[in-house]
Amino acid sequence: MTRLGFGGWFGLGALGLLVLVALAADLIAPGDPLDIVARPMLPPFTDWAHPLGTDQLGRDVFAAMIHGTRVSLLVGLAAAAGAIGIGIVVGTLAGFLTGWVDDVLMRVTEAFQTVPTFLLALAMVSVLGASTPNIILAIGISSWPQTARLVRAEILSLKSRDYVDAARMAGMRPLMVAFREVLPGALQPVIALVGVTVGAAILVESSLAFLGLGDPNEVSWGGMVANGRAVLRIAPHLVVIPGLAVALAVLSVSLIGDAFGRRLAPARER
Amino acid sequence: MTRHTGSFIARRLLQAIPVILIVAVGVFALLELAEGDAVDAFLAGTGGGDVAFAERLRQDWGLDQSLPVRFLIYLEAVFTLDLGYSVAVSMPVMQAIAIRLPNTILMMGSAILLSAALGSFFGGIAALKRGTPVDTGITVTGLVLNAMPNFWLGLIFIVVFVVKLSWFPLAGIATIDGPTDFLGRAADIAWHLVLPVLTLALTYMALYLRLMRGAMIETQASEWVRAARARGLPRGRIIRRHIARPALLPVVTMLGLQTGNLLGGSVVIESVFSIPGLGSLAYQAVAQRDLPLVAGILLAGTLLVIVVNLVVDLAYARLDPRVTDDRGRAA
């Protein structure tokens, strides 16, 4: 564990803090963060009842920041989990079954990879409506190709190993061999991708929220930046603070992904 | 260009057709999923009409047919580049895209090149100074910049460089009553594009940084570098020709793959800086629920990524003399 390095520990610490804040949001900042609670445009650090001030409608920035953690983390983690899940299934099927199944699946993967990710998510949210489950679905569907490719490549290289032949000769059914013998070994490099995928999902969610396509019933950091843009000249902190939170979340996830990827690296060439 | 290049291009374009078909299927499915159909959207945007009129429009546009027939009609439209009519901008979708595309290409192209250039340069320095604080500093900076939301960085730049320092304009791609001569206009557009391109380039720089750094560390340890050192070549030349040049190859490959990401990023950046490009058109389409326009931009974006990947592959084949085309001939 000590080989995680400073970056890895910083990332874990920051992410842990964010998760705690998300879970304890109702305790730290009770009430609805979208409620109007004080006079508008209160500067930060002046009134300790509202430590970060209020926005142009009089909503508490601190409460919004705390509750925004939930949306960003939930969407980021759920969408990435979905994307990686789909990627693993597709990659395993393609790598193990080969033949025309592999061809078809790889064409579909290529198609999804060619479509600009954000445009696809944008189109899906536009068609399906802007609610949190739809956003998770849209981001998940646009991000699975990378994982699928990686898993497939790993499986193709692991398939010819002896222990796979042994399992087959012992009479295991092909799909069982795929999922029980080959897949666990193929998952190692996927761990390095997890950091990237979660980070990208958080960024896409905040971008969608910034464009006004977030869930209107939830507070999101991206939405806060969009809100602050209207008063950018006189209250830039309304833009700066939420953006810093997004950057921190993505940075911590990236650092964790990097650290775990490097920790597993000695066994492989990269 | 050898005569093999032509067949290389032709083969790649042929390989792209299944991808375009799958994307067309997907887009069609997306359009079908939406409530209402093209006629409803058209009537809603153009002032409405009675049921009889709607029915007649449906017959004219073939929307009253069964699903398979509708799909075939849609496919035919896509391949004849008739992407429908956009009520958001009151012109055919194809025309709207064609007007906005050059601005986005200009901005994106500059951003990709700047991003790759900055990333390669600093990645090279990080590789040469591996293990020193310079290396750590460069890597961390790249990581931090990559973690920032690009719209946030853009807004920060606006606060610093536009509001506080007044160095650059706030919005748009050209001054409204600005210079009309070619050079003057080009300079004006460049001035407007500095901040958006810089924002895009900085946020995507980290990838090239990491690639170049990793690749250069590998080539530094390679045999031909050892041989060059043994021959006593000057250090600068070794770095430039034997270490850096081969390390650029993964960077070039990544250029094509990043096009999709930058196209997505341009939606937000064009919104922040009010650049009239494809990205802001996409946002407008989504905001006004203009699905033919959204679908058209999806297809156009996909096509753009395919074309850029093709160009990048050609460039890569030029740069790497070891690469032969699919049939084993030098490309």
Image (tube, coloured by chain):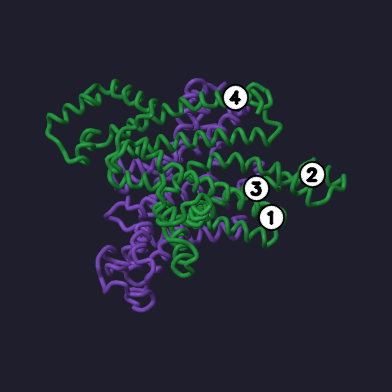
Chain colours: A purple, B green
Nearer the N terminus, badge 4 or badge 2?
4
Give residue B273's quadrant in the image.
Answer: bottom left
Q: Which mark is residue B212?
A: 3
Looking at the picture, tell me which residue is in the foreground, A122 or B13: B13
- Spatial CA distance of label 4 from label 1 is 38 Å
Q: Residue at 53% across / 40% down in the picture?
A: B257
Q: Chain of mark 4?
A: B
Q: Going from the N terminus, do you reach mark 3 or mark 1 first?
A: 1
Chain assignment, label 1 = B
| Residue B312, x across and y down, in percent | 58, 36
Disc assigned to residue B6: 4
Calculate the distance from the C-alpha at mark 4 to the C-alpha at mark 3. Answer: 31 Å
Which residue sits furthest right?
A: B231
Amino acid type at circle 2 is Val
Have a look at marks 4 and 1 and say if they share a chain: yes
Question: Marks 4 and 3: which is nearer the front?
Answer: 4
- Is B187 situated above or below B64? below
Q: Specify the amino acid type for callout 1.
A: Ile
> Circles 4 and 2: CB distance less than 8 Å?
no
User: Which residue position holds label 2?
Assistant: B225
From the viewer's side, name the closer residue of B128 and A259.
B128
Could you tell me which quadrant the N terminus of chain A lies in?
Answer: bottom right
- When the figure is inspected, residue B327 is found, relative to residue A56, above or below; the finding is above
* Of pointers 4 and 3, the one earlier in the residue sequence: 4
Q: Are marks 4 and 2 on the same chain?
A: yes
Q: Chain of mark 3?
A: B
Residue B117 position in % (x across, y down):
61, 50
